[in-house]
Image: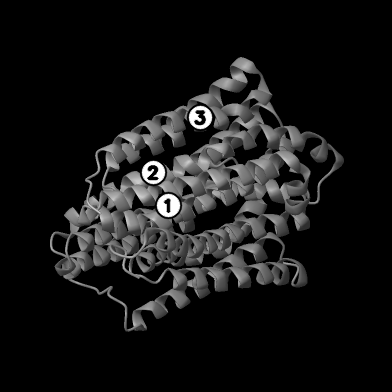
Amino acid sequence: MDLLQDRVKPIYFKYLTAAFGSALISAIYGVVDMAMVGQYHGPEGSAAMAVVAPVWNIIYSLGLLMGIGGSVLLSTLRGESARNRARSNEYFTAAVLGTAILAAAAWLGLICFDRQLLRLFGAGEALMPLARRYVFPVKFAVPVFLFTQVLSAFLRNDGDPGRATRAVLFGGVFNVFGDYFFVFALDMGIQGAGLATVIGASLSLLVMLGHFRRAENTLRLARPSGLWAKLRKIAATGFSTFFIDVAMGILTVLFNRQILRYLCTEELSVYGILINISTFVQCSAYSIGQAAQPILSMNYGAGKGARIRQTLRYALETAFLFAALWTAACLAAPNLFVRVFMKPTASILAIAPAIIRRYAISFLLLPVNIFSTYCFQALMRPRTAFLISVARGAVVSGVLIYLLPALAGASAIWFAMPVTELLTALCGMAALARTAGRLPDGT
């Protein structure tokens, strides 16, 4: 499939199907863990998983930093000229080396400071034992999670999006059945959920490595000239996508602390459910960005503005469709999500609908905002992507999470994200319109 010549619509939807499958199964990793643990341990298990969520945000974001940053630069170079293949592989090699460095740092940090990290993320004495039991098997497989993110990005940009999807599907299916087996059949509880996730991710990585045996594989390890300069460029290009996941971890910590300050553990349990719903919505948005990115980057390098605008139109239409579906589901059946993710008490069922419906308003614009970040990265506008991701993920949202409950009462905290997404969308869509208007007219 030629990203520079073939019709844009079938290319985009082929990549979208593969990316959505991959993103959906990735979401299932955490969601199945939450559901199984919630059913086994009750609300305390769901609250413990909410505390652990930032660990995943950090791990996955580090993989995205190298994977998205490196693959965008690789595709842009190849779009400029087919003769750039050897040079583009220097960015692939630099991304692999950068991932190894980040994986080692994250690995050591989690092994040595797990208690301190979990306390920072909101674990009190009651939740700390459960949270540490889940994290224990994860400690020994941190590099696996980073490299699955990196290889998934490069496989999509090397014309093999289907393998990335099959790999994640294979690991995800194991995770579903493994969760049940380890949590319930072996009576391991929350630690069994962590073990199943580790094994599933390892299987996914093994499937992805099969790409390098394909005759069509063009990814090669090449001695990178100016390694540190390339790593800086990869980090600058991939930072915004990296920060989306880091921001989810930051927001989770802020929400955890504010909920426990103004509300109680039951509301924290409901927020644990919202984290998992948000994970599905974000993964829908990731799939749009990941489907569009190779097309946008390659055609940007080739100066084909008309094809870029077509891709943007299909991507935005898909983003609004996902937004409408997820928002409608949350508004119509909030307690359905509660029953999926935990064995609820009567008081949880009483408070959950209002909380979920208020927070779910943010899903109307979340997919568009995340896609805009991917778009600006793909079009080599890292500064714009940086401003949008940081404003949405930390500055505006952080201020509102702290101010709203203090100024308007505890329940106002659930409106922090809807207001954040609205303000971000207004700025992001204006910037996107300006960028699209400045594209070259080449077809």
Residue 225 versus residue 199 in the image, above or below: above
In this rendered view, identify the residue nearer to me: 209 or 280. Answer: 280
Residue where numbered disc 1 is placed: 289
User: Is the N terminus in the top left, top right, bottom left or bottom right quadrant?
Assistant: bottom left
Query: Alpha-carbon neighbours of circle 3 within 10 Å: few (<14), some, or many (≥20)?
Result: some
Residue where numbered disc 3 is placed: 422
Horizontal side of residue 70 vs 331, given as left or right: left
Q: Residue at x 62, y 71 (%)?
A: 173
Q: Residue at x 20, y 66 (%)?
A: 90
Q: Residue 143: name its quadrant.
A: bottom left
Q: Residue 158: name its quadrant.
A: bottom left
Residue 172 versus residue 250 in the image, above or below: below
Horizontal side of residue 40 vs 324, given as left or right: right
Tag 2–tag 1 contact (CB < 8 Å)? yes
- Residue 419 screen position, x and y as percent: 54, 27
Amino acid bearing label 1 = Gly
- Of mark 2 and mark 1, the one earlier in the sequence is 1
Please tell me whether mark 3 sits on a helix, a strand or a loop. helix
- Residue 222 screen position, x and y as percent: 19, 72
In this rendered view, identify the residue nearer to me: 260 or 162. Answer: 162
Find residue 365 and name its label.
Answer: none
Q: Residue at x 40, y 42 (%)?
A: 372
In this rendered view, identify the residue nearer to me: 399 or 142. Answer: 399
- Residue 341 screen position, x and y as percent: 73, 52
- Distance from disc 1 to disc 3, alpha carbons, whole Å, reads 19 Å
